[in-house]
Image (tube, grey):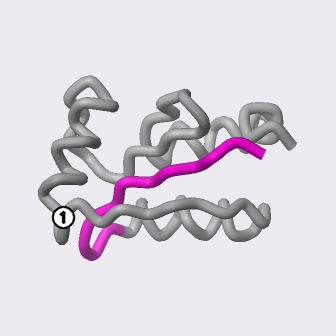
Amino acid sequence: MKKVVIYTGQFCAHCEWTKELLKRKNVQFTEYNIGKDPIKMEEMLKKSSGAKTVPQIFIGENHVGGNAELQALEKNGKLNSLLGV
């Protein structure tokens, strides 16, 4: 399974929905709260080509985008192959 990294923020419902979906699928992920770590915020901005909204989700080297994009991948049956399961 590919490494999953999520950049999240404080009081973010979309971040919670992202984590709930991944937990339901038994996918382990690394979470960085950019509200608590300015260095990780800079890292997220570089990796996401300047996207400032949270969550920002990365699967392997692929930038998925946010929660809406992740949920669409799951709905369309494409998330498992992207995860490598």
> Circle 1 — which element?
loop
Residue 46, above or below 21 = above
Residue 79 % position (x, y): 74, 39
The span picked out in magenta is: 1-12
Left or right: 61 as drawn, with respect to 85: left
- Amino acid type, mark 1: Asp
Residue at image position (17%, 43%) is 42
Q: Which residue is mark 1?
A: 37
Q: In the image, is residue 64 part of the stretch drawn in magenta?
A: no
Residue at image position (32%, 68%) is 12
Q: As rendered, which of 22 and 42 lies closer to the eye? A: 42
Return the residue found at the far front: 39
Residue 81, above or below 30 = above
Left or right: 24 as drawn, with respect to 53: right
Residue 63 % position (x, y): 48, 30
Left or right: 40 as drawn, with respect to 58: left
Q: As rendered, which of 8 and 74 lies closer to the eye? A: 8
